């Protein structure tokens, strides 16, 4: 389990909302049934193991600056093997296309190429593969 880099989720609930979570029968882009109207998780002490173990990249990688804080960026980042996944808040569909984020996404798409890495952006039902170059 990764160690948080001295960061806190604060009021963010993006990972309880943007991903599809099969174990909770939760589709993408809707709040988890356990999201509390007052904010946070209504079953926090008894939340499933997968929720306990999950941290987004902003929480675990200090190289992601303040601009990647999910509530600021309106998107969350996580990595699984060679794939870097960006889940964008559908209310801000162009957030990933704007600076400084888009340049960093291109760098991420470029850097892992020898290892076969890639960056995929999900915005609602739309899926994009980030190109390393602006073309
Ligand atoms: S997306 Fe990241 S910062 Fe937001 S609640 Fe999830 S782990 Fe915390
Ligand atoms: S169970 Fe709680 S922590 Fe897990 S996704 Fe639902 S609201 Fe979030």
Image (cartoon, rainbow, N blue to C red):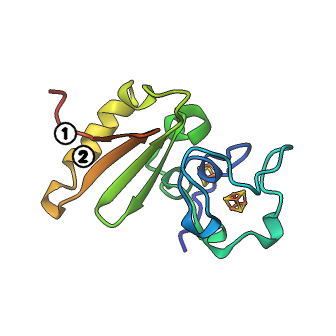
- Which of the image's four quarters has the N terminus? bottom right
Percent x, y of residue 70: 57, 41
Percent x, y of residue 29: 57, 44
Determine contact: label 1, label 2, CB under 8 Å: yes
Percent x, y of residue 15: 60, 52
Element on which disc 1 rests: loop
**Is residue 80 left or right of 37 when viewed as pictured?**
left
How far apart are the two marked residues, 1 and 2, measured between alpha carbons? 5 Å
Please tell me which residue lies in front, 101 or 92.
92
Report crowding for label 2: few under 14, some 14 to 19, many 20 or more residues within 10 A (C-alpha): many
Q: Locate residue 79: give its quadrant.
A: bottom left
Identify the residue at image location x=80%, y=64%.
44
**Is residue 44 left or right of 89 when viewed as pictured?**
right
Residue where numbered disc 1 is placed: 132
Please tell me which residue lies in front, 131 or 28.
28
Please tell me which residue lies in front, 126 or 88.
126
Residue where numbered disc 2 is placed: 109
Identify the residue at image location x=73%, y=46%.
10
Identify the residue at image location x=50%, y=34%.
67
Task: Find out if the beta carbon at label 1 lies less than 8 Å from the nearest ligand 1 atom.
Answer: no
Q: Locate residue 101: give its quadrant.
A: top left
* View extreme (right): residue: 38
């Amino acid at each position: 389990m990764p160690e948080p880099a001295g960061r806190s989720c604060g009021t963010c609930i993006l990972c309880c909302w943007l991903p599809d979570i099969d174990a909770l029968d939760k589709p993408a882009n809707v709040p988890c049934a356990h999201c509390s109207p007052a904010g946070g998780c209504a079953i926090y002490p008894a939340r499933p193991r997968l929720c306990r173990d999950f941290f987004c990249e902003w929480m675990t990688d200090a190289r992601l600056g303040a601009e990647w804080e999910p509530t600021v960026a309106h998107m969350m980042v996580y990595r699984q093997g060679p794939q870097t996944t960006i889940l964008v808040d559908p209310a801000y569909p162009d957030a990933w296309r704007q600076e400084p984020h888009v340049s960093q996404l291109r760098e991420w798409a470029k850097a892992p190429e020898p290892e076969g890495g890639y960056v995929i952006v999900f915005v609602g039902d739309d899926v994009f593969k980030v190109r390393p170059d602006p073309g």
